[in-house]
Amino acid sequence: MKFPLYRARRLRKNETLRSMVRENHLSLNDLIYPLFLIEGNNIKNPVKAMPGVFQYSLDRVGEEIKEIQSLGIPAVILFGIPQKKDSRGSEAYNPQGIIQKGIQAIKEVHPHLFVITDVCLCEYTDHGHCGVVDKGEIQNDPTLELLSQQAVTHVEAGADMVAPSDMMDGRVSAIRQALDGNNYSHIPIMSYAAKYASAFYGPFREAASSAPQFGDRRSHQMDPSNKREALKEVILDVEENADVVMVKPALPYLDIIHLVRENVHLPVAAYCVSGEYSMIKAAAEKGWVDYEKVMMETLVSIKRAGADLILNYMAKDAAKILNGVKIP
């Protein structure tokens, strides 16, 4: 195929033709919207570092759920901010905890919304780490028991899927055994399989009140320099019977998403994280980029890399565009 007989521009002539030959399509079914739930009444706290994102008390979250329903977004993932924290994150597995009550409140408003819950202790521990800490070290195996309890209480409250994000070794297997042992063998697990120790999580720490009080999370989250290790982590979770595997963050790790897609036959999720969102929002507010175009290009790039599902804070705005609704 050589010029002038072959002309690539022929298939770019107009929008109708471009749409007909488009290789990747973003749809509503790709979108999962994160929600932050907080104890209290009549609360809708704006997250300063994430314009347009809020913490909701349970008596206010219905407003958000109704909008999500109207836009056709099929799923949410929940993060909780408890009223009290302790060294073992006991509110994480309290049957009357913020997430457990939140699931029930959401299902009352929208019974068919697919509710995924984040399974981790960092939002519930007073030290801000993802597991039990002893002498300054995160204890892997004792943490597994607590994560399993947390997952079971989420499902008892009505969660449709659990998503362990802690990066403890063996947690997918432990949670699977706990769910199966409590007659929840039908509940799928979406594993944060390749979760990197990323600086892009910064704004999330404000949203979820989960900043570590000492040290960092590099002892369990992955080194950003490593690629082969990501595939090893993903395969371990596949072998432990994860149903969906996730790469987090998304944009700086498109090569990892592609690598996982090429080597794993399970659905692949990617989390377009808070730092990615906040950078786009900040640049748009400065007038440096077109928010709608950059947002859609970003989400399509994640899809093109191989993600089947995209967890992201732009989901409502993306849904408006997909529905033909103009963003104010």
Image: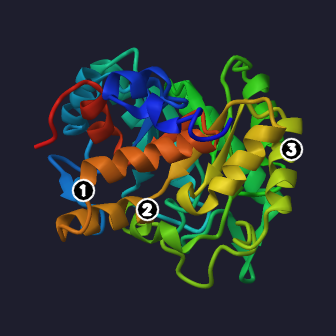
- Which one is in front, 3 or 315? 3
In the picture shown, does residue 132 fall above or below 74? Answer: below
Q: Which residue is mark 2?
A: 276
Q: Which residue is mark 3?
A: 235
- How crowded is the residue under tag 1: few (<14 C-alpha within 10 Å), some, or many (20+)? some
- Which one is in front, 43 or 248? 248
The local secondary structure at tag 3 comes to helix
The local secondary structure at tag 1 comes to loop
Image coords of residue 213 (percent x, y):
53, 81
Q: Amino acid at mark 3?
A: Ile
- How crowded is the residue under tag 2: few (<14 C-alpha within 10 Å), some, or many (20+)? many
Left or right, residue 93 beside residue 325: right
Which of pointers 3 and 2 indicates the residue nearer the eye? 2
Image coords of residue 85 (percent x, y):
47, 64
Q: What separation in Å lies between label 1 and label 2 (alpha carbons)?
A: 15 Å
Say whether residue 167 is visible: yes
Q: What separation in Å lies between label 3 and label 2 (alpha carbons)?
A: 26 Å
- Could you tell me which residue is drawn at 67 percent across and 48 percent down? 257
- Which one is in front, 59 or 288? 288
1 or 2: tag closer to the N-terminus: 2
Q: Are marks 1 and 2 in contact (CB under 8 Å)?
A: no
Q: Which residue is mark 1?
A: 290
- Could you tell me which residue is drawn at 62 percent across and 54 percent down? 254
Which of pointers 3 and 1 indicates the residue nearer the eye? 1
Q: Which part of the image, by quadrant, shows the C terminus?
A: top left
Number of disc labels = 3
Q: Are marks 3 and 2 in contact (CB under 8 Å)?
A: no
Image coords of residue 207 (percent x, y):
36, 61
Q: Amino acid at mark 1?
A: Asp
Image coords of residue 66 (percent x, y):
22, 26
Q: Give the number of the disc on residue 12.
A: none
3 or 1: tag closer to the N-terminus: 3
